[in-house]
C-alpha cells in the first residue's frame, strides 16, 4: 500500500528477511532485477530503507547517494566494514548491524578452528579417509594447547566469549586492544608486537576496515616466531595475506587457521597448496539457528525504525542517540 515504506533488499532473498519485511514494507529485491541500473533508477526516489543480506554486499557512499530519501541501512552480520557507516553517519543515515545474537556461535567456531589447527584434526581425518591408517597411524601433532598462551587480538563481545572458553580449557589468555578492558582478568598489551613476542598463538577477532588493515603484518608474524600459530576469525583485511604466505612458506611461523581471506571467496593457491594450514570458508556464524537470529535482527531493526521506535542495534558511527532521536 501507499503508506508502507519502500525497502531495497540487496543480496539473497532469505526467507526470514523476506517473510519479516513483507508485512511491513514494499520490498524491492535487487537480486531479481534483470537490469540493475534501470531497476534502481525506477525506485531510487522512493527507497527509505536498505536491507543488506550478506557481508559480501558492498554498500558504499556512491550507492547510498542514489537514494535521496534513504533513512536506514540494516546490515546482516556484526562486522559492517562492507558499509560506509562513517559516510552514512555524516549524512544522517542510520546503519544497524547484528551484534550479540552470534557471539557464542562464532566463539564455538573459533575454538573449533583453533583445535583443528593446533592438533591437525582435518589432516588426521584426511589420512583416515585416504585409507592410510592401516599403513601408519597419523603422526603425533607437533603442537599442543597444553603449553601455550593465546593472545587475543580484540576483546569485544566475541573476544570475551572466546576467552571464557579458553578459561575452561585451562589455557592462559592475554590480549591486545587500543584501550584496556576494565572488567576482564587478562593482561592487556598496548603493543601487538610485544604480545606476539610473548605468546605463540595469536587469535584475531577485531573489526575489519581501514583502522585494522594489515594490523597483523610481517613484523608481528616474525615476533610470533617459529612455533607460532595465527588464527584469523576477524576479516581478511586484518592480516597482510602476502606476508602470511611468505611466513608460512619460510616457516617463520608454524601454522595458521583461517576463516576469512583478503578477497573472498578467492583463496590464494599458495594457501590451498599448504598441507599444514587449516582453511574454513568463512563459517563463523554459519548455522541455520544463528543465521536465522541474525536475519531476524535485520528485520527487527527496520520494523522498529519504521514504527518510529528508533533502531535496535545502531553502529557507533550512526547519528542516533537512544531516546534522543536523530542528531
Ligand atoms: P566488538 O566491537 O564487540 O569488539 C571489537 C574489539 O576489537 C574490541 O575489543 C576493540 O577494542 C578491538 N579493536 C577495534 N579496533 C582495533 C584496533 N585498531 N586495534 C586493536 N584492537 C581493536 O566486536 P565483536 O566482538 O562483536 O566482533 C568483532 C569482529 O569479529 C567483527 O567486527 C567481525 O569483523 C568479526 N566477525 C567474524 C565472523 C566470522 O564469521 N569469521 C563472525 C562475526 C564477527 P578497542 O576499541 O579498545 O581497540
Image: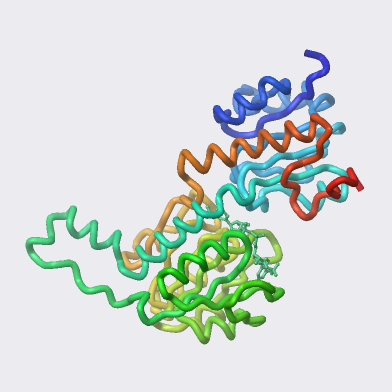
Q: What residue is drawn where x is 71% and y is 28%?
A: 37
Whether 71 is drawn above or below 29: the answer is: below
Q: What residue is drawn where x is 73% and y is 23%?
A: 25
Quadrant in which ligand 1 is drawn: bottom right
Q: In the image, 26: left or right of 208?
A: right
Q: What residue is drawn where x is 74% and y is 39%?
A: 73
Furthest-top residue in view?
Answer: 1
Q: x%, y% of residue 34?
A: 62, 22
Q: x%, y% of residue 89?
A: 83, 49
Q: How is the image coloured?
A: rainbow
Q: x%, y% of residue 59?
A: 71, 43
Furthest-left residue in view?
Answer: 134
Q: How many marks?
A: 0
Q: What residue is drawn where x is 39% and y is 78%?
A: 251
Q: In the image, 54: left or right of 96?
A: left
Task: Answer with the quarter of the image where residue 51 lies.
Answer: top right
User: Foreground: 201 or 322?
Assistant: 322
Whether 306 is drawn above or below 76: the answer is: above
Task: Answer with the quarter of the image where residue 41 lies.
Answer: top right
User: Foreground: 17 or 90?
Assistant: 17
Q: Quadrant of the N terminus?
A: top right
Q: In the image, 49: left or right of 295?
A: right
Task: Answer with the quarter of the image where residue 115 lies.
Answer: bottom left
User: Foreground: 196 or 59?
Assistant: 196
Whether 269 is drawn above or below 36: the answer is: below
Q: x%, y% of residue 137?
A: 14, 67
Amino acid at each position: 500500500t501507499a503508506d508502507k515504506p519502500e525497502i531495497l533488499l540487496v543480496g539473497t532473498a532469505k526467507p526470514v528477511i523476506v517473510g519479516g519485511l513483507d508485512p511491513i514494507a514494499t520490498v524491492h529485491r535487487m537480486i531479481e532485477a534483470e537490469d540493475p541500473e534501470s531497476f534502481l533508477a525506477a525506485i531510487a526516489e522512493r527507497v527509505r530503507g536498505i536491507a543488506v543480506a550478506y557481508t559480501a554486499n558492498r554498500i558504499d557512499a556512491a550507492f547510498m547517494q542514489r537514494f535521496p530519501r534513504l533513512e536506514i541501512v540494516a546490515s546482516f552480520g556484526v562486522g559492517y566494514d562492507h558499509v560506509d557507516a562513517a559516510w552514512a553517519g555524516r549524512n544522517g543515515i542510520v546503519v544497524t548491524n547484528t551484534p550479540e545474537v552470534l557471539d557464542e556461535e562464532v566463539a564455538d567456531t573459533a575454538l573449533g578452528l583453533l583445535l583443528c589447527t593446533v592438533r591437525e584434526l582435518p589432516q588426521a581425518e584426511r589420512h583416515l579417509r585416504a585409507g592410510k591408517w592401516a599403513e601408519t597411524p597419523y603422526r603425533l601433532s607437533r603442537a599442543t594447547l597444553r603449553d601455550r598462551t593465546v593472545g587475543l587480538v580484540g576483546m569485544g563481545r566475541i573476544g570475551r566469549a572466546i576467552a571464557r572458553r579458553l578459561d575452561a580449557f585451562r589455557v592462559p589468555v592475554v590480549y591486545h586492544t587500543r584501550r584496556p578492558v576494565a572488567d576482564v582478568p587478562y593482561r592487556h598489551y598496548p603493543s601487538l608486537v610485544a604480545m606476539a613476542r610473548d605468546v605463540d598463538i595469536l587469535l584475531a577477532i577485531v573489526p575489519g576496515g581501514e583502522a585494522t588493515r594489515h594490523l597483523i603484518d610481517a613484523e608481528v608474524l616474525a615476533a610470533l616466531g617459529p612455533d607460532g600459530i595465527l588464527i584469523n576469525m576477524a576479516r581478511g583485511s586484518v592480516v597482510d595475506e602476502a606476508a602470511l604466505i611468505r611466513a608460512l612458506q619460510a616457516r617463520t611461523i608454524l601454522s595458521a587457521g583461517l576463516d576469512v581471506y583478503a578477497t573472498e571467496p578467492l583463496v590464494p593457491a599458495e594457501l590451498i597448496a599448504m598441507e599444514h594450514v587449516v582453511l574454513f570458508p568463512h563459517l563463523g556464524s554459519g548455522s541455520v539457528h544463528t543465521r536465522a537470529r541474525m536475519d531476524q535482527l535485520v528485520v527487527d531493526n527496520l520494523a522498529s525504525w519504521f514504527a518510529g521506535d528508533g533502531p535496535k542495534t545502531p553502529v557507533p558511527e550512526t547519528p542516533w542517540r537512544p531516546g534522543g532521536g536523530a542528531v
